[in-house]
Image: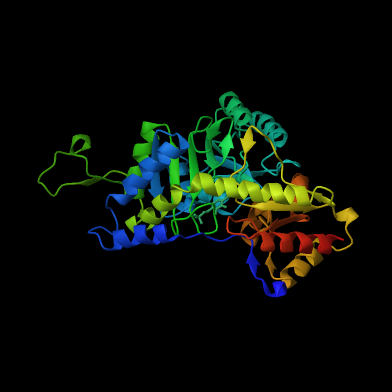
Amino acid sequence: MVKELKIPYGRQNVTEEDIRSVERVLRSDFLTQGPEVPNFESNFSNYVGSKYSVAVNSATSALHLACLALDLKKGEKLWTSAVTFVASANCALYCGAQVDLIDIDKSTSNLSIEALEKKLIQAKKNDSLPKIIIPVHLSGLSCDMKKIKKLSKQYGFKIIEDASHASGGIYDDSKIGSCRYSDLSVFSFHPVKNFTSGEGGMVSTNSEDIYRKIKLLREHGINKESEKMIFEPDGPWYYEQIYLGYNYRMTDISAALGNSQLKRLDLIAKKRNEIAEFYNYQFKDSPLDLPYQDTKNISGRHLYVIRLKNKDIQRSHKEVFYFLREKGIGVNLHYIPIYRHPFYEKFNFDKNMYPNSESYYNSAISIPMYPELTENELSYVVKSVKEAIA
Ligand SMILES: *Cc1c(COP(=O)(O)O)cnc(C)c1O
C-alpha cells in the first residue's frame, strides 16, 4: 500500500478558516483594491518587523519593482547567486541592466562571501562594480547579511534580499524581511512556498521613498494623492501618471488567503524545522551532506536539500532521482544553475568560474518538506532514500 504513495517535494496547506476568509471577500464589495490588501501589508510588516510592506501579484513582480525602485538602468550591473530560480536574475534584464553570477558556498549553498569579495575587488579595478546585489536565501536559510552589508558600504551597492524561500526564518534575532541589513526584501506566496496567497508576493522595506515608489509602480505609476500632485488638479476626477508603472496588484481574494495563512506562519516554520530535525537525525550516518545548521540563523525551511557524497554511493545522482521518483516520491532539484539555461547562453558565462555550483548541481536533491507530511510518509521517504544510496 505504502508503495502507491505520491509524495510531492512541497505542497500547500489550506484550512477551513482560510476558505471562510476567502469566501468573506467573495461576498464583499471588493474583489480587488479593497481593505484586505492593506490589511495583509500591515500584518506582514508587523510580522517581519519592517516599517513598510507592499503586496504584489508575485515575487517576480516584486523583484522587478525592487530593481526599478533602486533605479536600476540600462548598462548597469546586478549580481546574484548562480544557484537560484531564474526570476532572481531576470529582473535585471527587465530593466535593461546586465546580470553577473556569484558562485555558491560549499556548506550553506548560498552565495559565497569569499567569491563575492574576490569579484568585487576585481570589478573595482575594472570600474565595473554592481549597482545591486541580490542575495538569495536558498531553502530559507539567510545569507550572511552582516558581511554583505559591510561589503555594500565598502563598494557602494544596494541590497535586495530574495527571501522567496524564507518566510518565517530568523537571522541574527530578527525575522527575515526586517531589512536590518538590506534595502528591501522580496517574498513569494506561490502555493509551493512556505505559505500562500494562490499567487502573490511582497516587498518589505524601511525606506519611505522606496515604499512610495513601489506602491506607485505597482499601479501604472499613477498618483491619486492630491497633496502630491505635480500639475494643478482641474477637476474632482483628476489623477496623474508620474512613472511608467505596471498592473502588479494583488487581489483582495489572494490577500484574504495570505492574511489567514500568515497567522499560522510561526507554526508552519516550527513544523518545517521539526521535519528537518527528523531528517537530520535519520540521515546523520548516511553518505550525505545535510543542510547547514546555525542557532543564529534559523531557516524558513522551504526546502530540505540533501547532497549525495557521490564517491561513496553506487548509484549516480540521476539514478537516485529515478529510483525515488519510481517510489512515488516527488524529488526535485533546486536549481539548475542560471548559466546553464539556453536563454543565458548568449551571456557567455564560464562554467569553470562556478565549481561549487557545478558540484551542487551534480549532487543536490530536494526531498519532501511540508507541514502535512505524516510520520508514515516521513519514514517511507527516509527508508527509500537510504535504499537508494545503499
Ligand atoms: C519562487 C521564487 C521566485 C518567484 O516567485 P513567484 O512568486 O513565483 O514569482 C523568485 N525567487 C526565488 C528564489 C523563488 O524560489
Q: How many marks?
A: 0
Q: Which residue of the protein is positioned furthest toward the left in this rendering? A: 235
- Measuring 31% from the left and 51% from the top, which residue is drawn there? 36
Q: Position of residue 373 (x, y in %)?
A: 62, 59
Q: Position of residue 311 (x, y in %)?
A: 89, 54
- Measuring 29% from the left and 63% from the top, which residue is drawn there? 26
For residue 214, say whether it is visible: no
Q: Position of residue 157 (x, y in %)?
A: 55, 32
Judge left or right: residue 321 versus residue 198. Answer: right
- Measuring 37% from the left and 53% from the top, which residue is drawn there? 255
- Residue nearer the viewer, 261 or 216: 261
Judge left or right: residue 12 versus residue 230. Answer: right
Q: Quadrant of the N terminus?
A: bottom right
Q: How is the image coloured?
A: rainbow
- Residue nearer the viewer, 16 or 291: 16
Image quarter of residue 312: bottom right
Judge left or right: residue 204 versus residue 367. Answer: left
Q: Position of residue 20 (x, y in %)?
A: 36, 60
Q: Quadrant of the C terminus?
A: bottom right
For residue 153, say whether it is visible: yes
